[in-house]
Image (tube, rainbow, N blue to C red):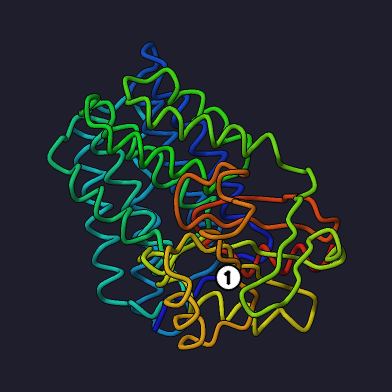
Amino acid sequence: MPISRTDPSGIFVLKIRTANRILMNRQHDTSMRVGTLATCVGILLFLCGLAFGQPARTSSDADTAWKQLQQAAVLPGHQPTDEQVVAAALAASEKANAFCTQFPGSSNALAARIIECTMLQTAYNHGDQQVFIKWLNVQSSLAPKLSADEIYIIRLPVLRALIKRFPQKEGYYEKLLSLATMVPEDKARPIANEILKDPVSDALKERAKALLRRLDNMGKPVDMKFVAMDGRPVDLSQMKGKVVLIDFWATYCVPCVEAIPQLKETYEKFHSRGFEIVGISADKDEKALKNFVQRHELPWPEYFERQSPQNFEAEFVIDSLPTLWLVDKKGNLHETSDAFPDLQAKIEKLLSE
């Protein structure tokens, strides 16, 4: 059973983003004393605890453990040494891990895992290099449970640390650029510009340029008109008033195929309210594509580009699969990503506008 969490007002994202920004800014200030940094970390975790509200009332043991974890997450703030901060952070991370193990069904389990991740980050930043792999594994396990904004907050410090430790490994720059495709323009554009200045290959720099061009198209109409494989005419200019997801994909793309159940579920949930999906396939074999579409019962129109006069992937600079575009009711490009962990929430919001 997935861990449930409610945060209808977005308080968690707002508070943890604000506190994390304070923390990261202070970490770059070499004149800052350790005590102040530890206090910032304490504030970050305290806000995390507040955002998730009161302890779950399913067990008095869980209530007690949650209160103890919140207390442990507020690190010492009176000029402690690095060793003291590391010891306190590791103790808090172990307590958070124990909470998740003992009370996996608690409504605070996800908050506890975030506390564990942030405490490991704190220990690493204060000199404990041995916790790095554990920190990396915990943040990776969190990703499926978080929104794009939360993934950005949790993953960005890890990627920064990896790049600092291994500046010649291009794979970490690639992951950083992929992270940029998941977040709004104000976060994505600085990362893309940064990649252009980094010691990376020309191919990766071209991908960064492609992302910047894509960001330039935000808020503008999407000109797309074609006849689908099943004969249905598709013209986005005639679909105003609807929310449209454009899925650039291929049957040979594993993440694309893995996303199909979620897309079908989303289509069935919102189609009657004005939600549409348009597939743009990069497959080479039209017959194989048709068989795939029929076998998986995909209800939306699919465009086969290989032998068609118009190549949308080239026109729109689609450099990786999958790539998803969300088009609002006005027919303008609203957002792009290689994945939308919170796709249904985004669609709900656009349909309500």
Q: In screen coordinates, is 153 left or right of 34?
A: right
Return the residue at label 1.
6
In the depicted structure, whether residue 256 falls above or below residue 148: below
Q: Residue at x 39, y 16 (%)?
A: 32
The percent coordinates of residue 121 (x first, y second) are: 30, 41
The percent coordinates of residue 268 (x first, y second) are: 65, 85
Q: Number of numbered discs present?
A: 1
Q: Residue at x 60, y 71 (%)?
A: 302
In the depicted structure, whether residue 339 falls above or below residue 122: below
How dense is the environment of label 1, judged by Cα within 10 Å: few (below 14), some, or many (20 and up)? few
Going by the numbered disc 1, the residue's amino acid type is Thr
Q: Which residue is drawn at 22% across and 25% down?
A: 168
Choose between 285 and 340: the one closer to the eye. Answer: 285
Give the quadrant of residue 350: bottom right
In the depicted structure, whether residue 27 falls above or below residue 61: above
In the depicted structure, whether residue 181 falls above or below residue 216: below
Choose between 32 and 146: the one closer to the eye. Answer: 146
The percent coordinates of residue 10 (x first, y second) are: 64, 57
Choose between 136 and 56: the one closer to the eye. Answer: 136
Quadrant for the N terminus, please.
bottom left
* Disc 1, SS: loop
Residue farthest along the left direction in this orientation: 130
The percent coordinates of residue 272 (x first, y second) are: 77, 84
Choose between 244 and 26: the one closer to the eye. Answer: 244
Quadrant for the C terminus, please.
bottom right
